[in-house]
Image: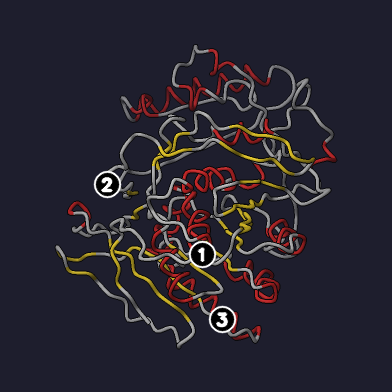
Amino acid sequence: MEEVQNCVMKLRSNPRRHRDKVYVGCGAGFGGDRLMAAYKLLQRVKELNYLVLECLAERTLADRYRIMVSGGKGYDPRVKEWMSLLLPLAFERKVCIITNMGAMDPLGAQKEVLNLASVLGLEITVAVAYESSFETQGSPVLSDESTGGRGGFIMCHILSYYLFFYVKGCSTYLGAASIVHCLENYKPHVVITSRVADASLFLAPMIYELGWNWNDTQLAQGTLASHLLECGCQLTGGYFMHPGDAYRDFPFEQLLDLSLPFAEVSCRGEVIVSKVDGSGGLLSPHTCAEQLLYEVGDPANYITPDMVVDFCNVQFHQISKDKVSCDGAKPSNACCPEKLLQLSPTESGWKGWGEISYGGHQCLKRAQAAEYLVRSWIGERYPGINEKIVSYVMGYDSLKAIGGDEDSYLAKQVLDHWTQEGNYSAKDAG
């Protein structure tokens, strides 16, 4: 089944409330997250209704496009490994999995998951929410893919004029609407998406289950919960621990059983974020406040495709060792942007790099001598090229690569470079 919908924000027609509370968990917060952590969350939290795997970012999306045009997979190839472990238990527990592992080819990911489900003996529905392309103005390009009667599609067209011209590799940050439509019409076991705003992946099941409409103020609290969940273990102490700091130091062993977070959200917009009872890490008002401000330019106007939220009066209260209540998010006075954010690949030339290691007596000075010589030789062969090259010594002035000014305080701070290498009998183990 294939549907074409537009993503112009329209009020839902008589939205039905399916639950008074919904439990949404974060199974992954970035492309390299730990599969076993997601499995443990699914295994330990019996109340869970949805598990969201947020595995896509600008770099990983660009990588998928580059690999796809070279003949490789346009979706995250780990989707098979992840679903092999998670699907049987999720199916048994009636937990819906939502993931953006579809990347540039969500239909390919859908086929992979359906084939896997067949091998596992599971009769499932896999819905796909993605942006389709336009070859000519106003003419949608529809896919001929078949789902074998077990998968639901929704093709989400952006009808704004500036997207009518198809640019290969472009990817628009869709909102929650397309996922809500999938949940409403197909009752899927799995929803696979292309690029969707991180918070929208989590907000969509809240809107569907709790009967919210697009103009309900509870969406602000739902977006708050979604923003807190989207980066996974950052909320539960993963980045908070700082050795030697009076307020952020705790034993390394406390991070061993680091739990991914989940949220309990009520139809009234009450939010409680939690980690697994008795698990490691730390969930506190401090970790919540740290994550609240992560990637937020203006707390008074946190912009998503679904709404603009004001976080200025948000408060966190410790309910128990593993639970924190979150209050105070409200719709911003700012209007939603008329246009959606879009990632467009551009030809930017080639990137080259090289490195060499020095150890022992005066190793820093020898590294600096090497930089001087190499720069001189390159400049002689390609005049002016040195302006486009950044050189740094790992562990000494690495931050000047992002700090801009070589004499700045930031550039002179020490950045330790940690490397781990191993010899493995199997490629996957490496």
Residue under pointer 1: 17
Mark positioned earlier in the residue sequence (3 or 1)? 1
Q: Measure the C-alpha gap from mark 3 to mark 2.
A: 35 Å
Q: Position of residue 176 (x, y in %)?
A: 42, 57
User: Mark 1: which secondary structure?
Assistant: loop
Q: Residues within 10 Å of mark 3 (few under 14, many from 20)?
A: some
- The circle on residue 339 is 2
Residue name at image x 35 percent, y 65 percent:
13
Q: Residue at x 66, y 40 (%)?
A: 325
Q: Label 1: how many residues lie within 10 Å, few (<14), some (14-19) or many (20+)?
A: some
Q: CA distance from mark 3 to mark 1?
A: 24 Å
Dot 3 falls on a residue whose secondary structure is: loop
Q: Using residue 2 as the reference point, say whether residue 230 is left or right of it.
A: right
Which residue does the image show at 30% across and 66% down from the upper left? 132
Crowd around label 2: few <14 · some 14–19 · many ≥20 (10 Å): few
- Circle nearer the N terminus (1, 2): 1
Horizontal and vertical percent position of residue 300: 43, 30
| Marked residue nearer the N-terminal end (3 or 2) | 3
Residue shown at 37%/50% (left/top)? 215
The amino acid type of the residue labelled 2 equals Lys
Q: Tell me the residue that label 3 is attached to.
A: 124
Percent x, y of residue 48: 67, 62
Task: Work out whether 171 lies above or below 353.
Answer: below
* Count of labels in the image: 3
- Amino acid type of the residue tagged 1 in the rendering: Arg
Q: Is residue 51 left or right of residue 176?
A: right
In this rendered view, identify the residue nearer to me: 366 or 236: 236
